[in-house]
Image (cartoon, helix red, strand yellow):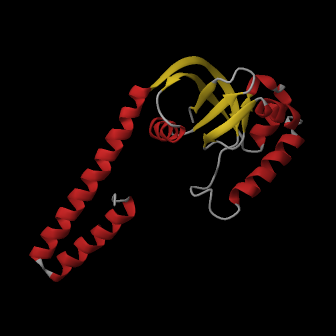
């Protein structure tokens, strides 16, 4: 079984216990466990970094977007994303940008990512941009990459994106079928 970050936390507690009770033999054992766990996780990360050899990206463009930042670290917990979605929709309606937002995203199938509200700034008028900014949306430059070739699974591609980009969306352009990575330079 591959060690996890939670395993490292447990081992750290064991190190603390062994150190507190003065058991040098136990301390050495748990330190060896910690080294093995960290080495295993690092090796796994290095293997994932090799995925970049199986993925060929072509930088297409840099586009100014406006996006609604997620304000919670663990956004999948509870109903945060549902509330976020409702607020996003309400704000887009108030700014008279909902139809444009929906048309844009109907043409781009979202495959994966961690951005939950955005659209190219050039698609909406200045008043709409100003209103969204007052609601807490931010301006951001999005680097657009086309996946010109890949020899890996979608799961591997997602892991590649998670390692390489802090904020991204993987999308499929419906008109061309092209797979794109949108890197939000937040």
The image quadrant where one finds the N terminus is bottom left
Horizontal side of 94 relative to 141 (left or right) equals right
**Residue at 78 percent of width and 39 percent of height:** 132
The image quadrant where one finds the C terminus is top right
What is the number of callouts on the image?
Answer: 0
Horizontal side of 49 relative to 39 (left or right) equals right
Image spot of residue 19 (x, y percent): 18, 75
**Residue at 13 percent of width and 68 percent of height:** 28
Image spot of residue 77 (x, y percent): 62, 62
> Residue furthest toward the bottom?
21
Q: Nearer the viewer, residue 1 or 18?
A: 1
Image spot of residue 179 (x, y percent): 62, 27
The answer to which quarter of the image holds residue 106 is top right
**Residue at 65 percent of width and 22 percent of height:** 63
Image spot of residue 144 (x, y percent): 60, 24
The answer to which quarter of the image holds residue 49 is top left
Q: Nearer the viewer, residue 160 or 23?
A: 160
Q: Nearer the viewer, residue 182 or 47?
A: 47
The answer to which quarter of the image holds residue 11 is bottom left
* Relative height, residue 100 to residue 112 (above, below): above
> Residue furthest toward the left?
25
């Amino acid at each position: 079984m591959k060690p996890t970050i939670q395993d490292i936390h447990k081992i750290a507690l064991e190190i603390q216990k062994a150190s507190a009770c003065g058991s040098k033999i136990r301390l050495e054992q748990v330190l060896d466990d910690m080294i093995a766990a960290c080495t295993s996780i690092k090796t796994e990360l290095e293997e994932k970094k090799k995925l970049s050899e199986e993925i060929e990206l072509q930088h297409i463009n840099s586009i100014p977007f406006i996006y609604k930042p997620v304000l919670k670290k663990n956004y999948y917990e509870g109903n945060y994303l549902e509330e976020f979605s409702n607020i996003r929709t309400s704000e887009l309606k108030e700014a008279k940008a909902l139809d444009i937002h929906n048309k844009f995203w109907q043409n781009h199938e979202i495959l994966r990512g961690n951005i939950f509200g955005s659209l190219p700034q050039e698609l909406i008028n200045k008043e709409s941009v100003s209103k969204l900014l007052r609601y807490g949306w931010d301006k951001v430059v999005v680097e657009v990459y086309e996946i010109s070739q890949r020899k890996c699974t979608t799961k591997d591609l997602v892991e590649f994106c998670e390692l390489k980009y802090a904020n991204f969306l993987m999308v499929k352009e419906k008109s061309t079928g092209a797979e794109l990575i949108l890197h939000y330079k937040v």
